[in-house]
Image (cartoon, rainbow, N blue to C red):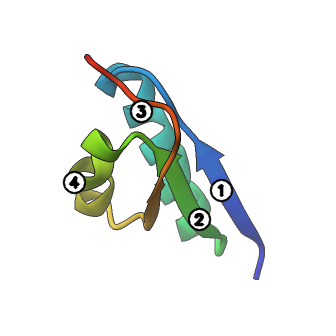
């Protein structure tokens, strides 16, 4: 199984395309993890992508 981590930072509009990409990769058989600011953890959980907190923060 191929594993990948997608790093995402910025506003929700920056994060959402990364979530769509992550789901598509999961559907293709990849193990995907999203590295994003902690305030987007719930959004990642809603799409069933495992996430890890990145050092980046977002105030948006």
Secondary element at image label 4: helix
User: Going from the N terminus, do you reach mark 4 or mark 1 first?
Assistant: 1
Residue underneath mark 3? 15
* Disc 4 packing (10 Å; few <14; some 14–19; many ≥20): few
Residue linked to disc 4: 42
Q: In the figure, is residue 2 to the left or right of 43? A: right
Q: Is residue 9 above or below residue 44?
A: above
Q: Could you say whether the residue bearing mark 2 is in a helix, strand or loop?
A: strand
Q: Residue visible at 34% across and 67% down? A: 48
The residue that appears at 71% across and 61% down in the rendered structure is 4
Q: Quadrant of residue 45?
A: bottom left
The residue under label 2 is 32
- Residue in the picture at 65% in, 56% down: 5
Q: CA distance from mark 3 to mark 2?
A: 14 Å
The alpha-carbon separation of the residues under discs 3 and 1 comes to 13 Å
Q: Which residue is mark 1?
A: 5
Q: How far separated are the C-alphas under marks 1 and 2?
A: 6 Å
Of the pair 40 and 46, the residue shown nearer to us: 40
Tell me where residue 40 appears, x and y as whole percent: 29, 43
């Amino acid at each position: 199984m191929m594993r990948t981590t997608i790093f995402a930072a910025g506003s929700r509009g920056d994060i959402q395309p990364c979530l769509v990409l992550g789901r598509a990769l999961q559907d293709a058989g990849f193990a995907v993890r999203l590295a994003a600011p902690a305030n987007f953890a719930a959004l990642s959980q809603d799409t069933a992508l495992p996430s890890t907190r990145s050092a980046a923060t977002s105030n948006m």
